[in-house]
Amino acid sequence: MPTARPRRGLPAVLGAALSAALTAAALLTAAAPASASGTQTIAAAADAGVFSGQPTTNWGSSTTARIDHSSSVDRPWYVRFPAPVVPAGERIVEAHLRFTTKALSAGYSAAPAIEVTGTSTGWSESTLTYANRPAASGTVSGTAAPAVVGATSDVLLRGYGGGPLSLVVQASDSGSAHVFSREDSGGRGPVLVVKTAKAGVQPDLSPASGSWLGWYLSGNADLRTTSEGAYGRQADAFRRYYSLSQSGTWPSAADTAIATADSGRRVLFASASSKCFGTCPTSVNGRALPAPGLVVTTAGPDFNGSYYTPQQISSGALDPAIDAQAARIKASGIRFVLDLMPEVDTVTEKMDDTTPVAAYGGLTLRDWWETTYPAAFRHWVDRLKAQGVTGVTFAVDYAGFRSDDTVYTRTYPGDAYVSWIAWDPYDFRCTKGGVKPTWSTFYTKLENGLLGTGAKTKSYGLFETGVGPGTAGSACRVAWINGMAEAAAALPKIKAVLYFNRASADYNLDSDPAVRSAWISEIKSPYFNQPHS
């Protein structure tokens, strides 16, 4: 969407409110982040020490291994483990290599300090020698101080996320020691200790429990410097609006900086419209682009303009623009959620739906646009992936206000193409009975099977939301804001709540001190403060 969006007057969402709000006690129960975890101790599947002084000798069957290193001697130890079992929905949060020192070598007073590095798993315990040993490689690493003889060394492994693991254990100082190998009959061989816990961030970039809380600021302002300090917390997510006409320019450097700051805690939710922002380009990277196929004049100020049509996109005519965008996404190096051609229900709401047109296959303009939309969405996704884009999680985003559900059933791209289903519910005049009724109407449709059974397994998101005062004034808005966490907990598939904090709109959070105070209080709710990974 444009970075400066005038207020939209969407039709009122139809339907009755759902059940009464949760009690405060119930909310506190629902808000507690999942904390279940498990620890696995995994015995080595293979190990062998190797020695530079005897480069072709194999010691794979020995009950001990020696670790030593100097300018003239090198004795690393190779250890391999099978993959741990990581329960669905969990991730590895901690991994340790543990082994026991048997004795010091003659002439040494201290066991060595240890450096552990990942290496190839493609070696055999019975044939490994110094001459054919694999080099240290990969991202797994760890260190440990010298161990007391007979004590267990514990090495925290950084960079291990699962799968079969091969390690090379080397001395990093002048110490030398013997350690028990996996063949030791006393059960003192090396083990991999893995702790798993509920993932803070799921593969689709949703939180494991609760909901991300974020907001959009006019002009794509940096919320780190413009509002986080004032609101007393960091955002989980931030919203950006772009166009296919801007291909190759986003994510911007600012987007990347925000998304990577603070260990990557802020998830970018980007939107790409087929509407031209500014002048429609005629080419990109020397490749021609067609003129936009339709000028929309009936969808309101935010949506009127020149559009590339779904048919132009699915035909491949816009592939040069999609390819340029793919290159930019890969160069950014960030993962983010991307919705394509958002709010099709708003764009087509007032298109002609009475006059069949031969150029549209005998369909009305609205029918033609909506029925060709899924193929365009799928082509866009397929083309990005074909160009090597792997870090994007795709979303379909609706306004969610239309009473004719046909617009949703015939524009849904399909379960294989989306991980998020989003809608943009507003209570512009504070007349919908509160935040939960505002959010729940489309949620209930989805849960009742509007888009099929598979769609009910997706993460749901509110990619825009807001409340205006209407005639009720400040009190209604304060009550609405104060109910946000409770409403989200009652609608638990909503995994992202993004407030559209437009400076010029009456649903702006900062123009009314009472509303701002309610917001600052509400966003501290445990339900909106989930762990990140």
Image (cartoon, rainbow, N blue to C red):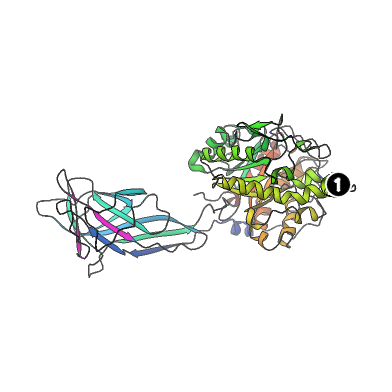
Residue shown at 22%/67% (left/top)?
A: 184
Looking at this view, is 99 or 32 the one in front? 99
Quadrant that contains the N terminus: top right
Magenta segment includes 62: yes
Residue 134 appears in the rendering:
yes
Q: Quadrant of residue 96?
A: bottom left
For the magenta stretch, what is the residue range?
56-80
Considering every residue shown, the one lying at the far right of the view is 354
Looking at this view, is 361 or 368 the one in front? 361
Magenta segment includes 243: no
Residue shown at 63%/56% (left/top)?
A: 416
Circle 1 SS class: helix
As drawn, 41 above or below 218:
below
Residue receiving disc 1: 358
As drawn, 69 above or below 2:
below
Instruction: Please state the horizontal and vertical placement of residue 157, each as a whole percent of the image.
Output: 35, 52
Instruction: Please state the horizontal and vertical placement of residue 103, each as a whole percent of the image.
Output: 16, 58
Question: Identity of the amino acid at label 1?
Answer: Ala
Residue shown at 42%/57% (left/top)?
A: 162
Residue shown at 38%/59% (left/top)?
A: 164
Instruction: Please state the horizontal and vertical placement of residue 216, each as a whole percent of the image.
Output: 65, 38
The crowd level at tag 1 (other Cα within 10 Å; few <14, some 14-19, many 20+) is: few
Considering every residue shown, the one lying at the far bottom of the view is 185
Looking at this view, is 129 or 286 the one in front? 286
